[in-house]
Image (cartoon, rainbow, N blue to C red):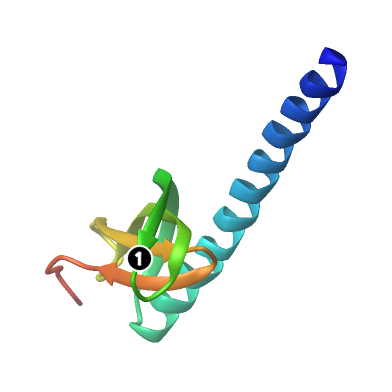
Amino acid sequence: MENIYYLLLVGLIFWYFICLRKVSEVARIHAKKYCEQSQLQFIAIARQSSRLTFNKKYGLVWLSKFDIEFSGDGESSNNAVLNLYGLKLGSVEVPPYRIS
């Protein structure tokens, strides 16, 4: 009987990593789209954190924060924070940056 619990635990861990991978792919798409719309050069994206949270607007969802590295002038790099609620874009927090 305990073998079923071990198998269930391994399956749950496997599902969690697949879910995080899908969220990362969606975050990359949102980041590239945001950079194209704002006429910025997209450089890189990295996961900052992911946690299960409750929000009045979205309910019980995975809140994932990503660091986006971009350039406004082609020479310097800047960082922004992208928030995803599940697979939906919540907000993009962009500090002031230099443009060409």
Q: Nearer the viewer, residue 90 or 48?
A: 90
Residue located beneath label 1 in the image: 55
Q: In which quarter of the view is residue 2 placed?
A: top right
Image position, residue 10 (x, y; %): 75, 26
**Residue type at numbered disc 1:** Asn
Q: Secondary structure at mark 1?
A: strand
| Residue for point 55% across, 69% down | 29
The quadrant of the picture occupied by the C terminus is bottom left
Q: Is residue 73 above or below residue 18?
A: below
19 with respect to 44 (left or right): right
62 with respect to 5 (left or right): left
Image position, residue 46 (x, y; %): 43, 46
Image position, residue 99 (x, y; %): 19, 75
Q: Nearer the viewer, residue 90 or 93?
A: 90
Q: Is residue 72 above or below residue 50?
A: below
Q: Residue furthest top?
A: 2
